Amino acid sequence: MPSPDLQESLEKIRPTLLRFAMLQLRNEAAAEDVVQETLLAALEGKSAFSGRSQLKTWAVSILRNKIVDHLRRGSREGTLPIVDEQGDEDFDALFDGTGHWQEAPGDWGDPAVVLEQRGFYEVLELCMKALPEQVARVFTMREVLGFETEEICKELKLSSSNCWVVLYRARMRLRECLQLRWFDAR
Amino acid sequence: MKSCREVHRLVIEAQDRKLGFAERLSMRVHLILCAACRRFDAQMDLLRQAIRRFPGD
């Protein structure tokens, strides 16, 4: 019998888990499924939760694996959208004719401080939501779920250079968004 | 010497693939000399650290 405490605590972090899953899967039904599987696995495997790490950290690590499984299954069944060649969206305007920055990048400060600031992760989430779906999928597989680049290319049937281009665009867009909505706004 | 435009790409690609020796060298030399690209490099580093800790606390 799962302890009512654990069940209750898991229920409390359910919305966080759901948001996390939605960001990577962009599909409500699929996100509900993986979160459900995660909660069940968490209840069944409660002995694995020693209380050393935070409950949320532990649940998110289970969720990551569930999402990875889901993506792998999807790519086998061919249901993942193939990332197509995107229009030549240009970050060229950031540079002048001689290849220098038009506007030099700003000092974002010490990551240890910035990441602790209240509200930072809400803005980051907003910025990730604003990424086009395919770009977001490649980027979260790489950075949130920790896939190697070669593995992503293989799973999504992309050429390596296409993978790098997509990841480049994701990073540049997130940088732009964070600059505008977080660093400039403070 | 490589331009900032070329180096900002290398800075990003270094996160996703292993750069060749010449690429790594030219990037390092540029970063030593260019404060703007060093700040860009630091921004990309912050972004990576932030995402790895997602969804935050």
Image (cartoon, coloured by chain):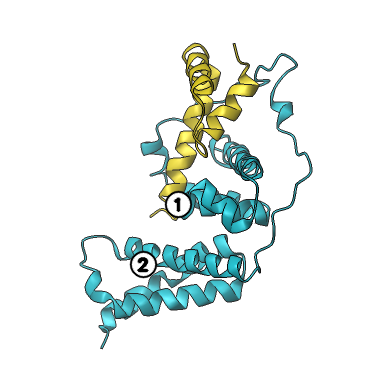
Chain colours: A cyan, B yellow
Residue type, label 1: Gly
Circle nearer the N terminus (2, 1):
2
Image spot of residue A30 (x, y percent): 57, 73
Q: Position of residue A92 (x, y in %)?
A: 73, 28
Q: Quadrant of the N terminus of chain B?
A: top right
A106 to A111, vertically: above or below = above
Q: Which residue is mark 1?
A: A146
- Comparing labels 2 and 1, the label whose residue is closer to the camera: 1
In the drawing, does residue A170 fall left or right of residue B15?
right
Between A82 and B57, the one lying in front of the other is: A82
In the displayed structure image, the side of residue B7 where residue A111 appears, left or right: left
Q: Is residue B43 above or below residue A73?
A: above
Element on which disc 1 rests: loop
User: Is residue A151 shown to the viewer in this render?
Assistant: yes
Mark 2 residue crowding within 10 angstroms, few (<14) / some (14–19) / many (20+):
many
Residue A125 in view in this figure: no
Amino acid type, label 2 = Ala
**Badge 1: how crowded within 10 Å, few (<14), some, or many (20+)?**
some
Write down the residue under mark 2.
A59
**Front in this rendered view, residue A182 or A75:** A75
Q: Residue A103: x percent and y percent?
A: 65, 22
